Image (tube, grey):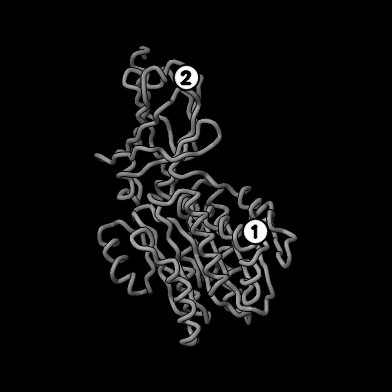
Amino acid sequence: MADGDDPFRGLRGIGFTSASCVLDSYDAATSTLRVRLVETGRHGYPHAFEFGCGLPEDAAARGPLTVSLVNAGASPYRHGWNGYRPFLSQDGAWTRLREPGRYVDDAFTFVVPRPGRPFRVAWYEPYDVARAHRAVRAHAGRGTVTTAVEEESGFAVLGAGDPALPAVIVLARQHPGEVMSSFFVEGFLDELLAGGAVTDRFLARNSLVVVPMMNVDGVRRDLHRTDGAGIDHNRAWGSRTPPRAVAYVEHLLTDSRPVRLLVDVHGDEVSRSSYLSYRTGRGLTLAERDAGVALLKRLDTPPDRHVWQAPSFARRSARALVRQRRLLIRPGLTAAEFAAKYASCLSCTYELSAHQVDPADAADQGRELARACADA
């Protein structure tokens, strides 16, 4: 092959690293990098992507680098590409690109403004298992806080307060690619367990259980929605052999411990606004229901964030999205559905918009929920 026909010419010896993409080609003349999503067997194509690259020293002189994800249409959330702004790291800090990308002819194209040094690009700022463990351990030993972290399995849980009091249960990362939910939980814990008035008000009436990373296996394998066995954790509730973390929370919801509220935090790849859909559990009194709904309605801030009651939300929105192939639905109970069926509590699915919510915004929304729980 002649040098002029080699699509990798100019990148040899510099390095392209990724678990979700492969290098397709690099055109120095037009400063265009083409990459391709990797199909992960039965898990399909991912939506979340991350790759690292270094360009020749003179690359900056050629101007901005155009990156094309040439088979972005293979993602089940392809309607979420247009206008999306990925994240860039050139010095260890992650920032969202200023200019939105374009989705045309199954390719998602965006621009890296200053590519003359090694850089990493990601659909969303990464948040790994080790950071989740640090977030849990940061609160160990504070008052009534208890923590458990298993290094090998990665399972981690934080508890606080008197177990005899009604529990607020918060879950994140059932879908491993929905990274923004981890930043939400970090903000929630930092606000709720800081040791001030918010902590005191909350623990006077509630206990707390937080599982910050439900699908550790999927996170470790860089999968977007399932674990390594192909199981969607948020469609496995009530199954015969649920995943370890799901079984743990199922036990909390079905034993004799009182539960006040379950919040299952996710990320939405397509929606331009965040939203909460809630369900009323069996045996919940009218007063308890009204108090829980009032808590959630404090977070209703249209047009950026909406609060709906399910299944009215499902009728008005989810079915339309399914018909348009914009929402992936698999059979099985979700966490919120399981809680509504088996526990006397309010259950809520909290969806953070990937388009709208940056990591700092996700943490701020977590802090808002903490204050709302303390004041309700």
From the image, state whether disc 2 or disc 1 is nearer to you: 1
- What kind of residue is marked 1? Ala
Which residue is farthest front?
197
> Are there few (<14), some (14-19), or many (20+) residues within 10 Å of tag 1?
many
Q: Position of residue 160 (x, y in %)?
A: 67, 68
In space, the residues marked 2 and 1 are separated at their CA atoms by 41 Å
197 or 370: nearer the viewer: 197
Q: Quadrant of the N terminus?
A: top left
Question: Which labelled disc corresponds to residue 99?
Answer: none
Q: Position of residue 50 (x, y in %)?
A: 47, 39
301 or 2: nearer the viewer: 301
Is 282 positioned to the left or the right of 320 in the image? right
Answer with the quarter of the image where residue 23 lies.
top left
| Residue 229 visible, this angle | no
Indicate the secondary structure of the residue bearing disc 1. strand
Q: Can you say whether 252 is above or below 322 in the image?
A: below
What residue is rendered at 55% in x and 77% in y? Answer: 260
What residue is rendered at 39% in x and 51% in y? Answer: 356
Is 361 positioned to the left or the right of 323 in the image? right
Which residue is farthest top?
2
Residue highlighted by disc 1: 156
What residue is rendered at 69% in x and 55% in y? Answer: 137
Residue highlighted by disc 2: 12
Choose the circle earlier in sequence order: 2 or 1. 2
Indicate the secondary structure of the residue bearing disc 2. loop
